[in-house]
């Protein structure tokens, strides 16, 4: 997973989204929406917090600051930070 151990406290819905990447390397916005059964109101906010914030747990294509329905997401295996406890 990461190069080191991190403590990343997340909300339940954020954890559910991260769990989707245990079985898939790359997911589209629509695939995440279908698998998580989240509304179009909640999903962009949750994906933004994981891919566009200070700590980018997920990588996003294209690499912009907004989440759109045509974006793709993948787990950021290159994630690294000097802090061991990270607040998303």
Image (cartoon, rainbow, N blue to C red):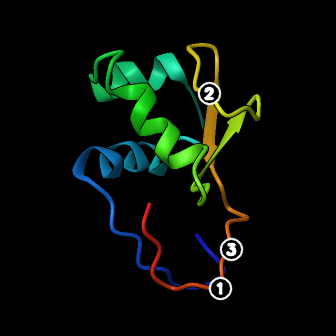
Residue found at x 41% / y 42%: 20
The percent coordinates of residue 45 (x first, y second) are: 41, 33
Q: CA distance from mark 1 to mark 3?
A: 7 Å
Q: Earlier in the sequence, mark 1 or mark 2?
A: 2
Q: CA distance from mark 1 to mark 2?
A: 26 Å
Residue found at x 61% / y 36%: 73
Horizontal side of 71 relative to 34 (left or right) equals right
Q: Which SS class for mark 3? A: loop
Which numbered disc, 3 or 2, marks the residue closer to the eye?
2
Horizontal side of 73 relative to 31 (left or right) equals right
Could you say which quadrant of the image residue 76 lies in?
bottom right
**Pointer 3 and pointer 2: residues touching (CB < 8 Å)?**
no
Q: Which residue is mark 1?
A: 82
Q: Residues within 10 Å of mark 1 (few under 14, many from 20)?
A: few
Horizontal side of 73 relative to 7 (left or right) equals right
Q: Is residue 87 above or below residue 43?
A: below
The percent coordinates of residue 43 (x first, y second) are: 38, 27
The percent coordinates of residue 42 (x first, y second) are: 32, 26
Q: Where, quadrant-wise, is the N terminus in this rendering?
A: bottom right
Q: Earlier in the sequence, mark 3 or mark 2?
A: 2
Q: Is residue 65 above or below residue 84?
A: above
The numbered dot on residue 66 is: 2
Could you say which quadrant of the image residue 8 lies in?
bottom left
Residue found at x 38% / y 50%: 19
The numbered dot on residue 58 is: none
Q: Residues within 10 Å of mark 3 (few under 14, many from 20)?
A: some
Q: Is residue 61 above or below residue 29?
A: below
Q: Which residue is mark 3?
A: 80
**Pointer 1 and pointer 3: residues touching (CB < 8 Å)?**
no
């Amino acid at each position: 997973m990461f190069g080191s151990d991190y403590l990343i406290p997340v909300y339940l819905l954020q954890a559910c989204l991260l769990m989707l990447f245990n079985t898939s390397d790359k997911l589209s916005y629509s695939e995440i929406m279908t698998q998580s059964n989240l509304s179009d109101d909640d999903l962009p906010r949750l994906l933004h917090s994981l891919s566009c914030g200070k700590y980018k747990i997920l990588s996003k294509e294209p690499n912009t600051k907004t989440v759109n329905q045509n974006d793709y997401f993948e787990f950021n295996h290159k994630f690294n930070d000097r802090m061991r406890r990270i607040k998303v």
